Amino acid sequence: MSGPYDLVIRSRRAVLPDGERPAAVAVRSGRIAAVTERDAPLAAVEEVDLGDLALLPGLVDGHVHVNEPGRTEWEGFATATRAAAAGGVTTIVDMPLNALPPTVTADALAVKRSAAADACVVDVGFWGGAIPGNLAELRSLHEAGVYGFKCFASPSGVEEFPELDEPGMRAAMREIASFGGLLIVHAEDPGHLSDPAGPGYPEFLASRPPGSERAAIARVARLSAETGCRAHIVHLSDAGSLPLLAEWRGRGARLSAETCPHYLTLTAEDVPEGGTEFKCCPPIRDAGNRERLWRGLADGGIACVVSDHSPCVPELKKGGFDTAWGGISSLELGLPVVWSAARTRGHDLADVVRWMAAGPAELTGLTAKGSIAPGRDADLVAFAADRRFVVDPDALRQRHPLTPYAGRELTGVVQNVWLRGAPAGRGRLLRRDT
């Protein structure tokens, strides 16, 4: 095509697939048309020079509980996607549970898509669910465009989304393998879980030991090898499971794993008495475990970092750790939380982009997302990588100002966000085949 580009963005710190360097990114019709030298002469309708601000690809968060419809008072598409954009996240993939109805049939997916229509500031895709009794629905959900299927190995916390036992998981994996799909698993084994012996965090932590994750992961891995189904472990908190994952990959299991900002930055020792904003499942573990998770990221044993943004109304966070809702809201803060901790461990922005943009995009098959390269969507983020700020919960865009990061000083501020070359604000609903 001839004529000027729609937009050219120049930066001395563009984070590209081959690393960070000065570059100019040219956009036409919502796609990246060219990536060239920073000072290259390029005619454009609009030009932006970021100077020393970093230019990142829009992040992809593949683990977000939006909860609309049905529990919109917990979080909704308008508030969740505003929070995403503020945090440099230009694509989210919504989890199938906590909304009513859960996304376990094609009809339920249509209800979810209707609720999201015209409400989203960033692009939104959807996971389907695999629960007892919906085996016959999985193929139609796949054909309707979900990116894969979420299941639980233990109770999910909501009665309308029961867990799969081993025969149910095997049957689901056989069916999903038959059409080349993906199963993502909340991996805690119910036989290793117990009711907390008291309201404090130590009792809660003891009730969900590392062995619960290892036992569930071993089951998923064995069934993956047996059925040929690609499987992914969500929100890995136990670093001791990493050798198990590596072993089963070596035995032919098509197995990957993600972790979350809270497991990489918070520790059990950090949790204050009564601080139920720190409660999540599986739980935040000790400082030594945290550092082993970082090593798993560095060596590729963990594929990506996603938020597991799991909000609720403030009333459900009241009480002790034995009764409060388990979920951490961090959609807006994930990038500065991870970057603040990564830079102190010798990692660079290219590492963070690999974990939080390219990795989730590759996992889900979002081939137009996740990197600054010709042909990709022009989802771009201007990031002040050295600017510090203190987390003010009341300034967050999520529906409720609940966060374990309140009052923490973080490094890295999102300055501007483009979605397909325009200011974020008009998100699309995505399908797996588009």
Image (cartoon, grey):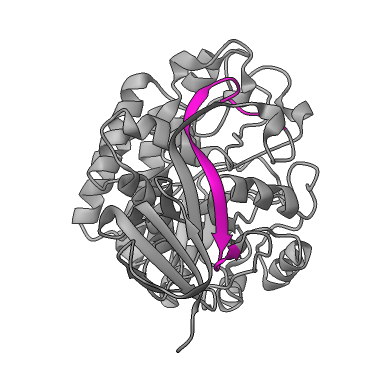
**Image point (62%, 28%), residue name:** 403
Left or right of 103, for residue 53: left
Residue found at the far bottom of this picture: 1
**Image point (59%, 70%), residue name:** 430
| Count of marks placed on residues | 0
Is 411 in the magenta? yes
Q: Position of residue 129 (x, y in %)?
A: 59, 60
Q: Nearer the viewer, residue 51 or 303?
A: 51
Left or right of 114, for residue 219: left
Is 432 in the magenta? no
Q: Position of residue 304 (x, y in %)?
A: 38, 49
Placement of 292 over or under 376, stated as above or below: above
Residue found at the far left of this picture: 250
Q: Nearer the viewer, residue 409 or 203?
A: 409
- The quadrant of the rendering that contains the N terminus is bottom left
**Image point (24%, 54%), residue name:** 249
Evaluate whether residue 368 shows in this view: yes
Evaluate whether residue 235 shows in this view: no
Left or right of 233, for residue 381: right
**Image point (38%, 63%), residue name:** 24
Left or right of 79, for residue 53: left
Placement of 257 over or under 317, stated as above or below: below
Q: Position of residue 275 (x, y in %)?
A: 61, 17
Q: Which residues are magenta?
A: 401-422
**Image quadrant where residue 142 sits:** bottom right
Q: Nearer the viewer, residue 50 or 109?
A: 50
Placement of 352 over or under 238, stated as above or below: below
Q: Position of residue 131 (x, y in %)?
A: 60, 57
